[in-house]
Amino acid sequence: MDGAVSFEHIIKMAKNAGPVPTAIIAAHNIAILKAVQKATQECIIQPIFIGNEEKIRQFSDDIGFDISTYELLSIDNPIEATIAAVDLVNKGRAKIIMKGQITTRTLMHTIIVKRPTLMKGGFLSHFAISNVPGYHKLLSFSDAALNISPGLKEKVEILKNAVTILHHLGYTHPKVAVLSSMEVVNPKIESSVHAAEIAKMNKENTITGCIVDGPFALDNAISATAAKNKSIQGPVAGDADFLLLPNLDSGNLLYKSISFLVNAPIAAFITGAKAPIVLTSRADNENTKYLSIALAAATLL
Amino acid sequence: MDGAVSFEHIIKMAKNAGPVPTAIIAAHNIAILKAVQKATQECIIQPIFIGNEEKIRQFSDDIGFDISTYELLSIDNPIEATIAAVDLVNKGRAKIIMKGQITTRTLMHTIIVKRPTLMKGGFLSHFAISNVPGYHKLLSFSDAALNISPGLKEKVEILKNAVTILHHLGYTHPKVAVLSSMEVVNPKIESSVHAAEIAKMNKENTITGCIVDGPFALDNAISATAAKNKSIQGPVAGDADFLLLPNLDSGNLLYKSISFLVNAPIAAFITGAKAPIVLTSRADNENTKYLSIALAAATLL
């Protein structure tokens, strides 16, 4: 079903997977609680709240979300709350971790360094998927939130993580565009060199399960007209399913462009640990948070 | 008139500046010729064509653009055509250079290395300005096309170039957001360190004529709601006029996002040489090319 995967399909998968026990760290935020409420009512998740009890109960009351039947661990300190969430996963009592009012840095530092029991020898990366109006299918990309300056090896790991998720969502041969700021290799532009190397590894079957091409600038990866104007051919040009981005600065910029300039729905989480980590930005709206919960749950089906 | 500058205002300035003699290199492209036709009819420019005569006349015929009264230098080789354009500027016979069907690399290499007589000791950078729906004013940014990995010094030069243009367009104190992938300084993320340093230079009056803050991720620079959600304050948060981007990969990505995801109008050119160089991508549409001509002409008023 390459090219036919939709958010509706992802939500359906999530409902089939649920209710997934989900540890929510520091949930005292209206957008987070509304997203959790919706995912709970749709039987996608069963929430376990970890944080400041008073604030969480007050905010839940404010939006009419009755959380009295759900577990709530009263742990105010964000690091201790994160450790408790990790322990719930290790005990098999939670299968998703969700970030609330805690910085990404504190959350990830606690998971990676302070309580690394969630690490299973895998490589952590951020995966995002969006429904951009005007594009003829969903567009996914990495890494918008975690890996700062991935080298060639790290980019291959990021790509493999993404392909695993895409296969799980129903893509058989996702089309991968490795992005740079141009379509030709320029030795001064590392991203263009990486792109050519990763495309070559795909041709030589070192990277499988997907069709990779690059380097691309964004336009030629997602616009058939732009690709044609520049005489750029191949199956990926103008038809990418997944964009492998040069670095965190550009990945974050694409994520924020889609969220705040295009105003398009987007779902995202951290993959590679024992449990998916839903890590939306505090600035994201409730729909983004809800879709991200659904995406994480769908990968558990 | 900070915040009140519009594309209408820029076009009005361009008409007051025109007709500006403009050397167009390798114009054999429908989108380019349509943009040149419009700018010519509106008395913004007076074109001087340099390129393959047969192709240029044929494409002009195809769109009903009578170019018989305009100068046409029949020079097929793109490097020689670029040198001819540079010489026209040096003789005072052209005041804008426009890129047609020639790669940016060939054009810029010829101007910077082969015929560097346009260089006036200034720093070359790319400046873009766009009208993004939903944002309450024009949004400008650098560098989307030229400087690959600008260091701190180069970023300051890029910013100074932009401020000069913005003052010219009518901004008195443009609000500048220096972008990174986060709002706090992380020593591992160079763009966040640069941002804090540039903001400090502005506070210490080393950089003047603008209000600088940073680091910002895109959302907090352009969304008051996002900034509020993250408790980010100051005059620039959510209200940026200009974004100083981390590097070419991210700058190019923002340009392409605005063009191909948002489908918003955008104008851009290279500044810092003796004449503005209009350098739209071959994938850009005719409106982008027309607006870019107008923007370049407006800076000559």
Image: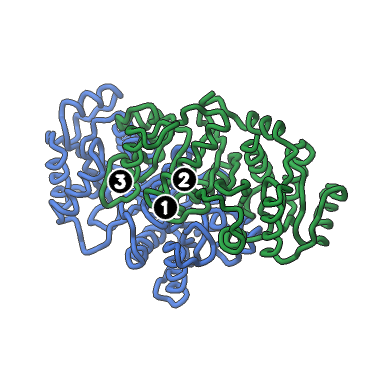
Chain colours: A blue, B green
Q: Secondary structure at mark 3?
A: helix
Of the numbered discs 2 and 3, the one sitting upstream in the chain is 2
State the residue position of label 3.
Answer: B193
Q: Secondary structure at mark 1?
A: loop
Residue A290 visible? The answer is no
Q: Position of residue B95 (x, y in %)?
A: 68, 45
* Crowd tier of the residue under label 1, counting other residues whose Cα lies within 10 Å: few below 14, some 14–19, many 20 or above: some
Amino acid at pointer 3: Val
Q: Please report, as a chain letter, where disc 1 is located.
A: B
State the residue position of label 2.
Answer: B158
Cβ atoms at labels 1 and 2 below 8 Å apart: yes
* Crowd tier of the residue under label 2, counting other residues whose Cα lies within 10 Å: few below 14, some 14–19, many 20 or above: many
* Crowd tier of the residue under label 3, counting other residues whose Cα lies within 10 Å: few below 14, some 14–19, many 20 or above: some
Residue B148 visible? The answer is yes
Cβ atoms at labels 1 and 3 below 8 Å apart: no
Residue placed farthest to the top in the image? A62
Q: Secondary structure at mark 2?
A: helix
Amino acid at pointer 1: Pro
Q: Look at the image and tell me in which quarter the C terminus of chain B lies.
A: top right
Amino acid at pointer 2: Ile
Same subunit: marks 1 and 3: yes
Q: Position of residue B146 (x, y in %)?
A: 51, 54
- Distance (Cα) linking label 1 and label 2: 9 Å
